[in-house]
Image (cartoon, rainbow, N blue to C red):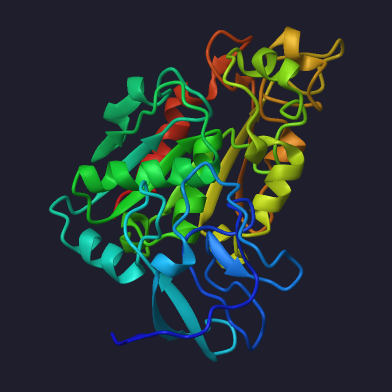
Amino acid sequence: MSHVSPTLPPHWWNDSTHCSRRPAFCASCASCTYGSKWYCRSSRSTMPHHTSTITPVTPAARSFVSSSCRRCGSAIVRVLASTVFSGSIADTSTARAAVAAGTRKHATVLVHGYCAEHNPFAPHKAQFANSLVFMANSTNMLNDEFAARIDAFLRAHDVRAAVAVAHSQGGKASLHLKAMYWSALDAAPDAVRVVQSVGTPWLGNSAMASFGSIGKVFGVTCGKNRDLTTAGAKRWLATIPLTERAGAYYYTTTYRLGKALGDYCSLGVNALLKWPNDGAAELKLAQLAGGNNMGNTERECHTRNMAYMAQCDDEKRNAIMNEHAQP
């Protein structure tokens, strides 16, 4: 692939809430067609803004190759760099080669949610064939960093092809990984469901915007996560193409509906959330437009130590997700 040195577009900035690190800007149709930590739109400032928690690569340090726009076919410029955690951009061709070299043909990665102290699928690992338990202890991560960690985990286990079974924010991170990066999820066979989740607040959490409420809602004190606020979730979801959402299969749960005196999963947080909810994810905000809604189950809650069984302990649902995770 030959390198060229084109003139940089005039308006570059770094903002992970708008696009991720698969870079391409098309001057012809003025679109960020792949998504990029660094990309151009004339509505923004002409100076790069270093707003991300990941250290950005300066424009001068990048190399460039020619490519074509997925949307209109015109020639565009792609930014190439190296690994994720150095703050640079993972080149798609390099990622493809790394994934293809994996010795583990297929894996089901079990992904926890926001700031988890344990993986709720871990006690049921035996229910999932070829499973790996992902764990980032009590870490508050935006969807992009979360996705990058899942990717690094799969690479560390030398996985060639994978599917994700995820809980809560883990569903968003898994879909982010599938939509924004080349990873083992892209190498999964067509017959499987690449992203399956339960209790994922696709449209955010109405209590997340308040730091004072967040500890009460989740029982932890990791602080606010802008990707889980309703406004932040809306911005994030706008970067996920409908074609990628179509590969997500999601389940929801709630307390018992239609009970004469009302019901709850967690009495202490019920007043902070829209009704009905599972004790953390609100049913109305757990809908993914363009995704596959696999239905709602009553009398199941977000985690253990709530009024009903934890949603990840549902062995019948786990069996269904495992069936659709295997090639």
Question: In the picture provided, is 295 more to the left or to the right than 186?
Answer: right
For the point 34% across and 40% down, the residue is 109
Position of residue 200 relative to residue 271, above or below, is: below
Q: Residue 105 lies in what quarter of the image?
A: bottom left
Choose between 202 and 138: the one closer to the eye: 138
| Residue 304: image location, x then y, percent | 52, 13
Which quadrant is home to the N terminus? bottom left
| Residue 115: image location, x then y, percent | 51, 24
Q: Residue 134 lies in what quarter of the image?
A: top left
For the point 46% across and 40% down, the residue is 146
Q: Residue furthest right?
A: 260
| Residue 316: image location, x then y, percent | 45, 30
Question: In the picture provided, is 115 more to the left or to the right than 326?
Answer: right
For the point 66% across and 53% down, the residue is 237
Choose between 91 and 243: the one closer to the eye: 91
Position of residue 189 relative to residue 285, above or below, is: below
Choose between 42 and 90: the one closer to the eye: 42
Choose between 198 and 170: the one closer to the eye: 170
Q: Residue furthest left?
A: 103
